[in-house]
């Protein structure tokens, strides 16, 4: 460190620098000594140069040394030194800015050491001051490089994370073009192409103005465009001026003026030593690609290539699996007389989109039809294969004419004898579309939903047994039948549990949602099936397969001269009686005979109560106009009991037994007829006539 001397007041007179001082000066570094007692600061020549001071302008004080130091930096430096002195520290260091004569701001650094006496009193400060511009410039460059590396690492990590969840090719394109995807890639635009035979197919475009490239969504792989050229040569190409490509690739010239980008990276996608496509990343305001940026682009291309390769293989497997499943399901649904049937199948939105759900419609003799929905355990090709075998077996058993309980028992034994541990749930019903009779059985499956002609819905209590396969394993092959009535205009809905299982809720909530959707849906079977698919399956993004079957018995309104209504009343539905009475009164008003409403409503109530109390099951109510030979109203109440009612003469204290007496008093005629497996009690009312007794 150079010594400084002072002869009286005025600027310090410096002695010649030593060899060490010369070396400091060459390195932009000088020394100083600050006498705290006198307040004078001695600077050597190198320090004067660092502070950009001339000898004649320096007065030897701390304030003079800080003549060209930025005021805010000078204040911060004084605070730093004062803090060291107050806390009895020994050293300090600080950066500050010197505003030089040429207008340049020079970053400067000082380091000082406090010299104290034996009692710890500060005597003077000795230190060095140096030009830190080059040092900080290097540090700034390092920080920029580190920031760039961190950004590149982030780009790779975020892209890898996004593509790790991609299963299909559509998933890959969605990950590359969705919200925030370009920012995640660090690009301003993107084009992704697949090599298919001798053709390049653009499957994804993202970025302003790039939609014009969709005009060339399919191009020949002949190297006439930069992307196909990169794929054919397997060499990436980095372009900092797109306009220069026009001369080399004339087919691209028409688009270059409309593409609002300056630079692009054309990257081949190589997977398992095969070029499967190409990726273009577009950039704005980029004049070069550094080595690090080129490596980043190549790394991104490798990530995309691997993801795309996995997706292509998955799509091929899924296409095979769905083809297998489609072959296992019925190719066509037979046409039926007296009704309409619609079926829908939706595969799960995960995995290979293949599973064991199925439906079937089986034409049976005497205008009957067998309807089935079922679900084999699992979501894989094995489940689909088991489903196909089980569907064919069940169809064969039904076609042999067995009753529904026997059909499921034999199907259960068939599944148990297969070389599999899978089980299956199933709902099977035989429907007589002429009479509306339904014989239903369940094997661990969801029961049917019925929509009545008045819009109400209900889940009839259909008894059931164990799932197919398990029933035979546990030697409990009992599948009790439940008989239902489907009146004209009513709709039967069968489905697998994927339609009613909403993630995070109970199956009861899903069943309520299904019932609501059926009530609010259209009348036609096909339209209702589409309505349910849109409202339910797509609503909660089913992770399960869904098989849906909708059967509607043709409505029977009669004719204009002889109209007719039908209604089914459940045994456990007290509101059904009230709804039926209202429907009768409304119909009679519409038919122009409101004066009969009281008598008809009272007689219907007696017949319905009698059927619901004394038989097993619900009752079908029919009211029609008979125009010949005399216009009259006929009321039918059909149930499944073969026991005929009889008119009694109850005593005065009896509380029952007066129903038929009341009907006999109100109606013109009444009687009982056999109907299939049950009976029908009827009564007639003359329009404009007076009641009389009949038997």
Image (cartoon, rainbow, N blue to C red):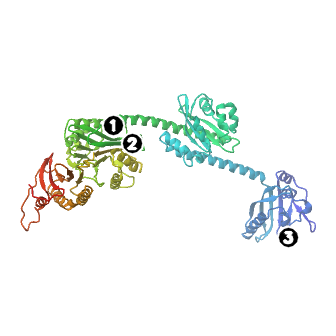
Q: Give the residue pinned by disc 3.
A: 38
Residue 693 position in % (x across, y down): 9, 58
Residue 41 position in % (x across, y down): 85, 65
Q: Secondary structure at mark 1?
A: loop
How many residues crowd mark 3 within 10 Å: few (<14), some (14–19), many (20+)? few
In this figure, what is the number of numbered marks? 3
Q: Secondary structure at mark 3?
A: loop
Q: Secondary structure at mark 2?
A: loop
Residue 57 position in % (x across, y down): 90, 62
Q: Give the residue pinned by disc 2.
A: 347
Please tell me in which quadrant of the rendered image residue 122 appears: bottom right
Residue 161 position in % (x across, y down): 53, 46
State whether residue 145 is above or below residue 661.
Answer: above
Q: Nearer the viewer, residue 15 or 93?
A: 93
Q: Are marks 3 and 1 in contact (CB under 8 Å)?
A: no
Relative placement, left or right, of 652 versus 194 is left
Relative placement, left or right, of 128 versus 321 is right
- Badge nearest the viewer, 2 or 3: 2
Residue under the point 68% across and 51% down:
143
Which of marks 2 and 1 precedes in the sequence?
1
Residue 344 badge: none
Please tell me in which quadrant of the rendered image residue 600 appears: bottom left
Q: Taking the image as drawn, is residue 547 in sight?
A: no
Quadrant where the N terminus is found in the figure: bottom right
Which of marks 3 and 2 precedes in the sequence?
3
């Amino acid at each position: 460190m150079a010594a400084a001397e002072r002869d009286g007041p005025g600027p310090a007179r410096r002695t010649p620098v030593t060899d060490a001082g010369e070396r400091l000066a060459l390195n932009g570094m000088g020394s100083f000594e600050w006498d705290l007692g006198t307040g004078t600061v001695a600077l050597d020549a190198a320090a004067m140069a660092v502070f950009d001071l001339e000898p004649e302008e320096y007065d030897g004080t701390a304030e003079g040394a800080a003549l060209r130091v930025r005021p805010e930096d000078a204040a911060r430096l004084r605070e730093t030194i004062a803090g060291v002195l107050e806390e009895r520290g020994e050293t300090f260091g600080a950066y500050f800015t010197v505003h030089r004569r040429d207008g340049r701001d020079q970053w400067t650094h000082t380091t000082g050491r406090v010299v104290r006496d034996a009692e710890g009193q500060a005597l003077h400060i000795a230190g060095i001051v140096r030009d830190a511009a080059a040092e900080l410039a290097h540090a700034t460059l390092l920080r920029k490089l580190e920031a760039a590396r961190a950004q590149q690492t982030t780009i790779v990590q975020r892209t890898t994370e996004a593509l790790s969840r991609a299963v299909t090719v559509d998933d890959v394109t969605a990950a590359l073009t969705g919200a925030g995807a370009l920012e995640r890639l660090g690009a301003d635009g993107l084009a992704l192409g697949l090599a298919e035979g001798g053709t390049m197919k653009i499957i994804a475009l993202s970025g302003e103005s790039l939609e014009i490239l969709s005009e060339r969504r399919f191009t020949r792989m002949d190297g006439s465009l930069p992307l196909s050229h990169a794929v054919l040569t397997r060499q990436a190409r980095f372009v900092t001026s797109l306009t220069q490509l026009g001369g080399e690739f004339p087919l691209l010239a028409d688009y270059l003026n409309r593409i609002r980008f300056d630079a692009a990276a054309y990257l081949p996608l190589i997977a398992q030593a095969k070029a499967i496509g190409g990726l273009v990343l577009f950039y704005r305001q980029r004049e070069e690609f550094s080595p690090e940026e080129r490596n980043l682009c190549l790394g991104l291309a490798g990530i995309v290539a691997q993801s795309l390769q996995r997706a292509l293989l998955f799509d091929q497997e899924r296409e095979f699996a769905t083809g297998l499943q489609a072959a296992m399901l019925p190719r066509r649904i037979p046409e039926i007389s007296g009704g309409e049937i619609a079926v829908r199948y939706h595969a799960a939105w995960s995995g290979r989109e293949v599973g064991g759900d199925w439906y079937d419609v089986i034409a049976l003799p005497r205008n009957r039809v067998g309807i089935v929905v079922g679900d084999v355990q699992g979501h894989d090709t094995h489940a689909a294969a088991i489903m196909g075998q089980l569907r064919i077996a069940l169809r064969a058993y039904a076609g042999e004419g067995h009753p529904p309980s026997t059909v499921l028992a034999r199907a259960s034994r068939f599944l148990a004898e297969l070389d599999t541990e899978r089980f299956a749930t199933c709902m099977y019903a035989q429907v007589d579309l002429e009479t509306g009779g339904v014989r239903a059985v369940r094997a661990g499956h969801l029961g049917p939903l019925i929509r009545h002609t008045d819009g109400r819905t209900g889940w009839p209590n259909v008894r059931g047994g164990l799932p197919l396969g398990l029933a035979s394993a546990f030697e409990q092959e009992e599948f009790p039948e439940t008989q239902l009535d489907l009146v004209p205009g009513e709709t039967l809905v069968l489905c697998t549990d994927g339609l009613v299982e909403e993630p995070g809720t109970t199956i009861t909530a899903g069943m309520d949602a299904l019932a609501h959707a059926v009530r609010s849906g259209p009348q036609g079977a096909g339209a209702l099936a589409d309505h349910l698919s849109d409202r339910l399956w797509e609503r909660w993004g089913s992770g399960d397969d869904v098989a849906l079957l909708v059967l509607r018995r043709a409505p029977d309104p009669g004719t204009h001269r002889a109209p007719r209504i039908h209604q089914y009343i459940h045994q456990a539905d007290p509101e059904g009686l009230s709804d039926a009475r209202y429907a009768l009164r409304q119909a009679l008003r519409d038919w122009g005979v409101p004066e009969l409403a009281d008598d008809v409503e009272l007689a219907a109530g007696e017949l319905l109560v009698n059927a619901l109390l004394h038989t097993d099951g619900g009752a079908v109510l029919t009211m029609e106009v008979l125009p010949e030979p005399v216009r009259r109203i006929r009321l039918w109440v059909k149930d499944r009991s073969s026991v005929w009612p009889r008119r009694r003469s109850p005593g005065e204290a009896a509380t029952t037994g007066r129903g038929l007496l009341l009907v006999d008093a109100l109606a013109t005629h009444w009687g009982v007829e056999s109907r299939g497996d049950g009976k029908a009690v009827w009564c007639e009312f003359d329009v404009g006539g007076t009641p009389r007794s009949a038997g």
